[in-house]
Image (cartoon, grey):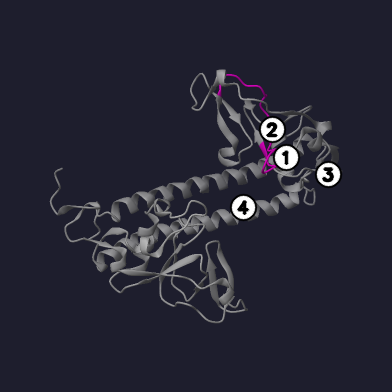
């Protein structure tokens, strides 16, 4: 394979001529955290870190230089960077990084590694310190590492600011729902008592059934254009697509197995499978308003042992409270929808910048694009 000028072929691929290929052991040492029983959790200032995050604070620290952390057992694929004094317990490795490497650069490099390929256990995923140190990497000079780190840190800061804004908007919406979905705060022009009804009085309730494979496709096209929803929470429950719809638009689905009681407004015709519950309104009611009410005002009791389940007879007994007029329901729903649209736009922006960061890491950490 022809290699362009200024680059060379190595065991880790084509890299710039000035870059070296070394094992991680040349620039860092992987260290074990202490047993959790050796760490005295007090009202200290130094975080005690495990694979799940901060588990307490101590008056003393284990290490006080910038370090990259990686799980020894359990969560082994989430590297972290810390530049303040800290403790780690024995399920979390920390690293002592030499002066020839920029710790933040190592952090970004760790993000590009598939850690599960180094898993050494058949049960709970586990990493070995020597295995980590023996990983071979391409490494530029320290000055170029810093340029790369600066570029990636700028994107990280942007991602962090968008994340904070999303959380702020979600908190604002949560506060609005506490007021608007309870009638504590009324919109201008509306008054009067709200109505309390059981779900079965307002909705016909159905449960999804078996998947009809004869009219099903995993991809959407002109023939298979109707969404098929399941009890999953990912992707708003989309399981696939059907050539026929079983349920009408302006309905609600409610998860009924595992994570029970999560309601989603369905604007378009659809099909449902498994134990997913479908609520079809008997009259003129704003289903988006009711879906938000269910998610924020109803706590479903788990009435069986084993995997949590919610049945049509069980959900039918729960009480919902809503304005007597459809116009007030619509007005509240519009406010909440606008908030949702704003949050969704920010989440799309967040995903865009996360994708940009991934592309930058692939180019910068391999030397395909140079900043010097």
Label disc, if present, on residue 336 of the rendered structure: none
Residue occupying the point 52% across, 57% down: 74
Q: How far apart are marks 1 and 3 (CA)?
A: 38 Å
Q: Distance between the residues labelled 3 and 4?
A: 27 Å
Residue 141, relative to residue 12: is it above or below?
below
First in sequence: mark 3 or mark 4?
Answer: 4
Relative placement, left or right, of 352 versus 164 is: left
Q: Residue furthest front?
A: 122
Viewer-nearest residue: 338 or 277:
277
Crowding at dot 2, Cα within 10 Å, few <14 / some 14-19 / many 20+, comes out as many
What are the residue bounds of the magenta stretch?
242-264
Q: Quadrant of residue 372?
A: bottom left
The residue beneath circle 1 is 309
The residue beneath circle 2 is 275
First in sequence: mark 4 or mark 1?
Answer: 4
Q: What element carries label 3?
A: loop
Residue 77, relative to residue 223: is it above or below?
below
Q: What element carries label 1?
A: loop
Q: In which quarter of the image is residue 42?
A: bottom right
Q: Distance between the residues labelled 2 and 3?
A: 39 Å
The residue beneath circle 3 is 191
The residue beneath circle 4 is 170
Crowding at dot 1, Cα within 10 Å, few <14 / some 14-19 / many 20+, comes out as many
């Amino acid at each position: 394979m022809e290699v362009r000028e200024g680059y060379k072929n190595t065991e880790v691929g084509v890299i710039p001529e000035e870059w070296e290929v070394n094992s991680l052991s040349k620039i860092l040492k992987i260290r074990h955290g202490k047993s959790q029983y050796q760490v005295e959790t007090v009202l200290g200032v130094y975080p005690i870190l495990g694979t799940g995050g901060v588990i307490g604070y101590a008056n003393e620290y284990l290490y006080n230089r910038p370090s990259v952390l990686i799980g020894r057992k359990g969560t082994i694929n989430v590297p972290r960077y810390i530049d303040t004094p800290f403790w780690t317990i024995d399920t979390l490795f920390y690293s002592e990084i030499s002066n020839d490497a920029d710790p933040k650069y190592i952090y970004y490099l760790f993000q590009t590694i598939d850690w599960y390929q180094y898993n050494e256990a058949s049960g709970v995923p586990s990493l070995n310190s020597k295995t980590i140190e023996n990983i071979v990497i391409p490494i530029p000079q320290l000055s170029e590492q810093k340029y790369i780190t600066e570029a990636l840190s700028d994107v990280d800061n942007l991602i962090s600011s968008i994340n904070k804004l999303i959380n702020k908007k979600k908190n604002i919406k949560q506060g609005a729902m506490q007021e608007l979905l309870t009638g504590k705060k009324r919109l201008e022009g509306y008054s009067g008592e709200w109505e309390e009804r059981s779900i079965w009085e307002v909705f016909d309730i159905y449960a999804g059934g078996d998947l009809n494979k004869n009219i099903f496709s995993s991809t959407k096209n002109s023939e298979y254009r109707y969404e098929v929803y399941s009890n999953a929470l990912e992707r708003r429950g989309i399981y696939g697509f059907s050539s026929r719809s079983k349920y009408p638009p302006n309905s609600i689905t409610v998860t009924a197995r595992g994570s029970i009681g999560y309601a989603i407004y369905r604007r378009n015709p659809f099909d449902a499978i498994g134990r997913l519950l479908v609520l079809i309104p008997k009259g003129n009611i704003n289903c988006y308003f009711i879906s938000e009410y269910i998610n924020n005002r109803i706590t479903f009791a788990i009435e069986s042992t084993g995997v949590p389940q919610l049945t049509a007879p069980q959900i039918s007994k729960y009480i919902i409270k809503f304005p007597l007029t459809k116009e007030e329901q619509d007005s509240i729903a519009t406010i909440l929808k606008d908030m949702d649209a704003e949050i969704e736009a920010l989440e799309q922006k967040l995903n865009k910048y996360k994708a940009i960061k991934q592309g930058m890491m692939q180019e910068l950490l391999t030397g395909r694009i140079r900043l010097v």
